[in-house]
Image: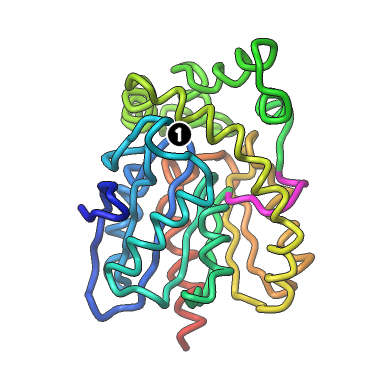
Amino acid sequence: MATVDGQRVFYREAGPGDAPVVVLLHGFPTSSHMFRHLIPALADQYHVIAPDHIGYGRSSMPSVDQFSYTFDNLTEITAGLLEGLGVHRFSIYVHDYGAPIGWRLAMDSSFEVTAIITQSGNAYMEGFAQPFWDDLFAYASSPGPDTEPGARAKLTSQTTRWQYENGVEDVSLVSPDGWNHDQHLLDRPGNDDVQLALFRDYPTNVDGYPALQEYFRSSRVPLLAVWGEGDEIFAPDGARAFARDLPDAEIHLLPTTGHFALETHVSAVSGYIHGFLGRLAA
């Protein structure tokens, strides 16, 4: 646990202290808990750091009156954690909400992001799968009593479970631990206001796509995209789109799985990561 700008930031850490650093950035509606199997798989060769964003997991959850829940502010907290840990050079693994946080870190001159691993971490309009995003963009563009119910539907236990199971051929392989853990935290008093605030702020990430894509073209940052082929939240076309700006991007679509591919394909994902980062170090 660390304290950044008065907020408690929980993070998981493993691996040799002198090894290359990989920062794992989780998405909605989960926490670093989603990396519970990936962390030990990477810690043999890498120093792994996986924080919980503010409002998620075991980190602080101030009310919306006490903290402005924007992706800029979540990034500032993550940057403060890394600064406090003395980490300035690292690879990032981004998933879902972790992507816009990771993109901001990558474009921050305070840090050197040496490589990007994106697993359903979107950077292109092609990635937004319908109909999942319809209600969220409607709410973000016009918050009010007509659009809020559609946004709140994303916070139900049915939707949380669906996020884990969508696109998975054999759902018996998906442990209920993930969605039950996430739903317990979503159901905390006041967390719905946190999530609604971030839904309203999400278009700022889309507004940043042109600058982000220019960063890809100018930096030629090494990138591995490894996505569930059945993801109905961030569609496979979002993975393929990276090749437009990063022709050398390594792109793998995992059959028979979806948005939370680590629940069913952690060995495959960790294998791709080891190969990708190993080739960069060679």
Residue that appears at 39% across and 54% down: 77
Residue 36 x/y as whole percent: 30, 47
Q: Is residue 272 magenta?
A: no
Tell me if residue 248 comes above or below residue 9 in the rendering. below
Secondary structure type for disc 1: loop
Determine whether 107 is above or below 230 in the image.
below
Instruction: Decide: is 222 above or below 272.
Output: below
Q: 254 left or right of 56?
A: right
Q: Residue 84, located in which quarter of the rendered image?
A: bottom left
Q: Residue at 71%, 62% (x, y): give it.
A: 242
Q: Amino acid at mark 1?
A: Pro
Q: Is residue 128 left or right of residue 282?
A: right
Looking at this rendering, what residue extends furthest in the bottom direction? 282
**Where does label 1 land, which residue?**
29
- The answer to which of 54 and 153 lies nearer the viewer is 54
Residue at 55% x, 22% y is 154
Which residues are drawn in magenta? Answer: 121-127
Of 36 and 189, nearer the camera is 189
Q: Position of residue 22 (x, y in %)?
A: 39, 67
